[in-house]
Image (cartoon, grey):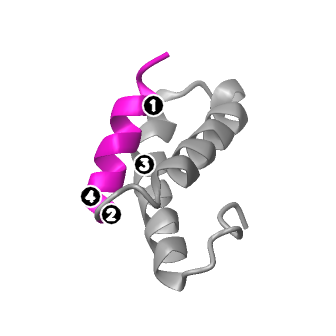
């Protein structure tokens, strides 16, 4: 489980929901060969921003913006 370090079930749920939504958006536009690496990168970004975000929508917006910065 990628977000097992979160102690609060609400944080875990928010992180997983945000990841699922982000991956749904990003996966179709990523080459299949790059998907494992990009999935791991997305997990890291979601985990990094979860506690700072106000809610799931804020988390998605922060991760979306950061994901496209290379």
In-front residue for pair 16/30: 16
Determine whether the residue tagged by mark 2 lies in a helix, strand or loop.
Answer: helix
Determine whether the residue tagged by mark 1 lies in a helix, strand or loop.
Answer: helix
The answer to whether mark 2 and mark 4 are in CB contact below 8 A is yes
Tell me which numbered mark, 3 or 2, is placed earlier along the sequence: 3
Q: Where residue 15 sits in the image (x, y, percent)?
A: 49, 64
Q: Which residues are drawn in magenta?
A: 55-70
Tell me which numbered mark, 1 or 3, is placed earlier along the sequence: 3
Residue identified by numbered label 4: 57
Residue identified by numbered label 2: 56
The answer to whether mark 4 and mark 1 are in CB contact below 8 A is no
Seen at 61% across and 48% down, the residue is 43
Q: Could you tell me which quadrant the N terminus lies in?
A: bottom right
Question: Which image quarter: residue 44?
Answer: top right
Q: Where residue 10 sits in the image (x, y, percent)?
A: 46, 80
Dot label at residue 22 = 3
Foreground mark, 4 or 3, reads: 4
Is 55 placed above or below 26 here?
below
Is 13 placed above or below 38 here?
below
Distance (Cα) linking label 3 and label 2: 11 Å
Tell me which numbered mark, 4 or 3, is placed earlier along the sequence: 3
Indicate left or right for 49 with 42 as reference: left
The answer to whether mark 1 and mark 3 are in CB contact below 8 A is yes
Question: Which image quarter: residue 67?
Answer: top left
């Amino acid at each position: 489980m990628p977000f097992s370090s979160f102690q609060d079930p609400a944080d875990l749920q928010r992180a997983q929901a945000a990841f699922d939504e982000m991956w749904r958006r990003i996966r179709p536009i990523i080459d299949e060969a790059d998907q494992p690496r990009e999935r791991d990168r997305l997990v890291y970004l979601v985990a990094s921003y979860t506690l700072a975000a106000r809610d799931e929508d804020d988390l998605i917006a922060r991760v979306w913006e950061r994901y496209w910065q290379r």
